[in-house]
Image (spheres, grey):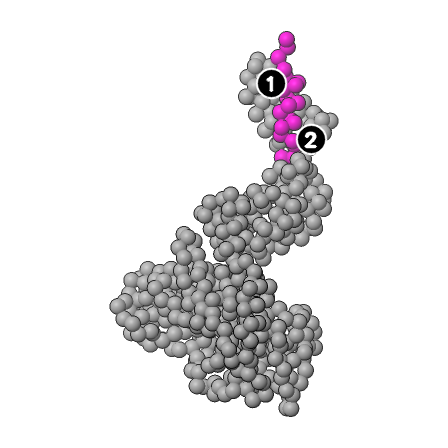
Amino acid sequence: MTVIDLVSYEDALAAYDPVMGLEVHVELGTKTKMFCACATALGAEPNSQTCPVCLGLPGALPVVNAIGVESAVRIGLALNCEIATWCRFARKNYFYPDMPKNFQTSQYDEPIAFNGYLDVQLEDGEVFRVEIERAHMEEDTGKSTHVGGATGRIHGASYSLLDYNRAGIPLIEIVTKPITGAGARAPEVARAYVAELRELIRALGVSEARMEMGQMRCDVNLSLRPHGTETFGTRSETKNVNSLRSVERAARFEVQRHAAVLSGGGTIVQETRHFHEEDGSTTSGRVKEEAEDYRYFPEPDLVPVAPAREWVEELRAELPELPRVRRNRLREEWGISEHEMQSVLNAGAVDAIVATIEAGAPQAAARKWWMGELARRANEQGVDLVTLPITPVQVARIAALVADGSLNDKLARQAIEGVLAGEGEPDAVVESRGLKIVSDDGALGTAVDEAIAANPGVADKIRGGKVAAAGALVGAVMKATRGQADAGRARELILERLAPAE
């Protein structure tokens, strides 16, 4: 199926209702793996953080990571879930090159958290409740690198390399109940849900949840059913989508693809699919297994997990301020409208603005730069705002340079450009690019004198009392100094030189 085969989104929604299910995998920020003492630090040499347990060698016995269990409970509580009084791990059996044991230690019919919900706010302020089926503990697989070929996937590759450093990393998989009733807004709901979930995970401090680094990944399950029917259609599962924008695009594409297949008399195949960032399309991966194909059975080498009720309540009492509550508090502190706060949320700028304020910037300046120049650049590049290579501390420094008169807004934008280009810290960029405002009377006076000499007619008007004409000369001074003149001081010097004789 290619893009040419798609029906329009509007035509798809005219005939069908979308039904979604979102499965989000979150890598926990523990120091060691889920069932062994191997380190989890990123960037190590391939296969240097492994042991007999995470390599699945005979006779190796797992031990549960206590912080992993605590993190799972904290996530469950924040998602309004019930916490199991007793649960256990299971073996999920399948052969895959990056799964050294040929089974994954996971949870099947006895998850640690279940039956919750998360309220998410859409761009126009509407709140949509996404119900949570379960949140369960498991381990990540290794990483396959396919070498050769044009796509980086196994098809067409010359050979594959396996790195088991990631095998055994603690994961929490959060699975929604079928999401119905969203209609044409289903892709928007998907994006808003993953965004809110990411904010929640970060607030809990259990993971950085950086999607671009694979610390949080979303599988988008989608099916269509004709209007007026209750039976769900056959679903597809688009795997490992790793940005908010891509989650929305994947859901939208699958709505159009399913509708095209069904409208043409075809049958949807239950399968996994790959998402392609370059054009927002998906392609077939493999036929999707049913639960019985995995031959789940209780893990014989791990004892059940039975969280004490007193401990669970202690963790509930220690939960931090959750994202929606925090946003409402910040909106009141910043003195902005709900619409303005929604814009900040939509841009993914809340944490960046808070960090910039904490670094010393006034809140108005922090919002101005993140929601203005930086949001514009992120949109142009098609990336999330927080992935731009500039820190809140650097933005706060640029705001300080504007506040003390060293830069004006135009020069500040050039300083931001330099920081984003990797030219160094703001002060170094200002120095190397020669951006600092000219405010000393010597250099500025020379520019003023040259502007007066070049515009005698304007000068005569000012001498005659038409002070408003000074704006033209200020403009000439700004042009001559490449926008680096102190406009206020330039105006003062112009009026001093051209004051009518008494």
Query: Mark 1 Cα within 10 Å, few/some/many (few <14, many 20+)?
Result: many
Q: Mark 2: which amino acid?
A: Ser
Residue designated by label 1: 459
Looking at the rendering, in which quadrant would you find the C terminus?
top right
Residue bounds of the magenta highlight: 482-502
Q: Mark 1: which amino acid?
A: Ala
Callout 1–callout 2 Cβ contact below 8 Å: no
Q: Tell me if 287 is positioned left or right of 493 in this view.
A: left
Asked if residue 294 is positioned above or below residue 494 in the image, the reply reads below
Q: Tell me if 190 is positioned left or right of 362 in this view.
A: left
Question: In x, y percent, where is residue 133?
Answer: 44, 72
Looking at the rendering, in which quadrant would you find the N terminus?
bottom left
| Residue 253 can be seen in this image | yes
Residue designated by label 2: 439
Q: For residue 405, which quarter of the picture?
A: top right
Q: Residue furthest right?
A: 442
Which residue is depicted at the point 57% across and 25% down?
471
Asked if residue 454 is positioned above or below residue 314 in the image, the reply reads above
Q: Residue furthest bottom?
A: 59
